[in-house]
Image (cartoon, rainbow, N blue to C red):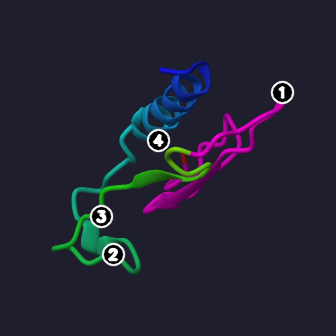
Amino acid sequence: MSPLASRLRLLFLSVVLAACAEPAPSSGDASSEPGVDAGTVETPTVTITAPLDGDTVTGPAVEVTLALNGLTLAPAGDTTTGTG
């Protein structure tokens, strides 16, 4: 496995672990939150959208683009509910 692939996997795992580190406080009833259906619980997902699998990157810097579903990205230390 190339060093770049190893770093991308480590980055992806770090983002996933950070997103799942603390469960959001719950009132016990999802229907009490506006816009949340009590019967539907969406699992947050993080996907690397660039570079694509198999792409070759060159240079000292690599731009990695992530797509988040069911989660809002916030700066480190931000404790706003629903962010990670």
Residue at point 52%, 44% (across, down): 54
For label 3, the SS is loop
- Most foreground residue, 52 or 10: 52
Query: Residue at 51% of width from left, 58% of height from top?
Result: 68
Q: Which residue is mark 2?
A: 36
* Residue, disc 3: 42
Q: What numbered label is drawn on residue 60?
A: 1
Task: Look at the numbered discs 4 and 3 and tell me whether their residues touch, using CB distance below 8 Å.
Answer: no
Earlier along the polypeptide chain: callout 2 or callout 1? 2
For this view, does 38 lie left or right of residue 80?
left
Specify few, some or many for label 2: CA neighbours under 10 Å numbering under 14, 14-19, or 20 or more: few
Residue 83 is left or right of residue 16, and the answer is: right
Label whose residue precedes the other's in the sequence (4 or 1): 4
- In the image, the segment drawn in magenta is 55-83
Q: Quadrant of residue 67?
A: bottom right
Q: Which badge, 2 or 3, is on the more N-terminal residue?
A: 2
Q: Tell me which numbered mark, 1 or 3, is placed earlier along the sequence.
A: 3
- The CA distance from mark 4 to mark 3 is 14 Å
CB atoms of marks 2 and 4 within 8 Å: no
Prevailing secondary structure class for the magenta stretch in the rendered image: loop
Residues at marks 2 and 3, CA–CA distance in whole angstroms? 10 Å
Residue kind at label 3, given as amino acid type: Glu
**Which residue carries the number 4 mark?**
19
* Label 3 crowd bin: few (<14), some (14–19), many (20+), radius 10 Å: few
User: What's the CA distance linking mark 2 and mark 4?
Assistant: 19 Å
